[in-house]
Image (spheres, rainbow, N blue to C red):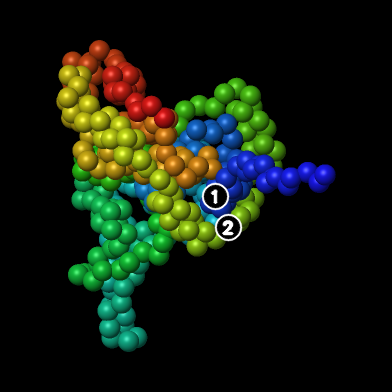
Amino acid sequence: MNPIPTEPSAVYAPPAMPKSTAVLQQIRAAVNQVFVGQDEVLSQVLAALLAGGHVLLEGKPGLGKTHLVLALAHTFGGSFRRIQFTPDLMPSDVCGHTLFDMSSSTFRVRRGPVFANLLLADEINRAPAKTQSALLEVMQETQVTIDGESHALAPPFMTFATQNPIEQEGTYPLPEAQLDRFLLKVLIDYPDALNETWVVKAVSSRASGGGLSASIVSQVCTPEDIIAAQEEAAAVQAVESVVDYAVNIVRATRQHSAISLGAGTRGAISLVRTAKACALLEGRMYITPADVKRAVLPVLRHRVQLAPEIAISGQGVDDMLLSLLKTVEAPRA
């Protein structure tokens, strides 16, 4: 008697990794060739790139902030420009201006350094408010207005601004309105002893300290791949309960007795955008409460201000945010 045929048992197949995740892994590996021992910093920068946001980099001199941005530009063949902000820098030095062309007897536009894919505004707090504000339009609307005419920037566009947290003499602190334009505030600390030793040996292995140049970083994708990755990050699923969790965290910053200035609605939007990028970096097309928690410090540390009596006590913003996070109930995944 012939056996009765049965349906083949279903075999579980894990979901395929999103295409953008593989691209970002290649970018991470390429940058890690010259930016060593700062994995969390690189993850946050890549998350900001995916989310299409801007980054405020804060760290002591000599920790590789410029190196990181230049290496990142090399990975996708993007254009890179650096502006050293100084007290005498003018808005036209940043955005551009019109000049009279004697040969054609017409005015033509001379574009400033903001017309790039990755813009590094080095020591942004050394320029006066008038020059700092020149970046507001370009960061928010990715366009520049020169003599009443708007000029769009080619995507992808991302601003990195650096600050020295120690030396404050002769600086102009960024106003809250401009701080809020940065998706993340990323802190770069000293590497551990093993990685620092490796970097010192690598840099000093060639003449003039050129042993760890960003020029060795190979291009692994194109600007179009970055734009596609940003679109895929925006499509990551965010269920209502997790979005509510992000909103509740932001609302809690406005009610906490130790915080004098809480985060606005843009803070909640930034939490969800960054959480989506973190999920995509890990190969998921949905966000979890853990993604939101991971984004809290870089997203909110520059959007809240401590009450004066708390700041005097020596407690930092990060400590307060971590304490606040424990009071907000996370949804059950």
In terms of image quadrants, where is residue 323?
Answer: top left
Q: Image height check: is 32 above or below 112?
A: above
Asked which secondary structure carries label 2, the reply is loop
Q: Residue at x 37, y 42 (%)?
A: 238
The N terminus - image quarter? top right
Please determine whether, in this image, residue 129 is positioned above or below residue 41. Answer: below
Q: Residue at x 52, y 59 (%)?
A: 225
Q: Position of residue 307 (x, y in %)?
A: 18, 21
Task: Tell me the number on the disc at residue 194.
Answer: none
Q: Quadrant of residue 324?
A: top left
The residue at 22%/41% (across/down) is 265
**The C terminus lies in which quarter of the figure?**
top left
Which residue sits furthest top?
A: 313
Task: Measure the C-alpha gap from mark 2 to mark 1.
Answer: 15 Å
Picture coordinates of residue 6, whole percent (x, y): 70, 45
Q: Position of residue 20 (x, y in %)?
A: 53, 51
How would you rate the neighbour count of disc 1 (Cα within 10 Å): few for under 14, some for 14-19, many for 20 or more? some
Q: Residue drawn 29% across and 43% down?
A: 269
Q: Earlier in the sequence, mark 2 or mark 1?
A: 1
117, 81: nearer the viewer: 117
Marks 2 and 1 close (CB-CB < 8 Å) = no
Given the image, on which type of amino acid does mark 1 rest? Pro
* Res. 126 in view: no
* Badge 1 element: loop
Question: Which residue type does callout 2 highlight?
Answer: Cys
Tag 2 residue: 221
Question: Horizontal and vertical percent for residue 223?
Answer: 50, 60
- Circle 2 packing at 10 Å, graded few (<14), some (14-19), many (20+), is some
Tag on residue 18?
A: 1
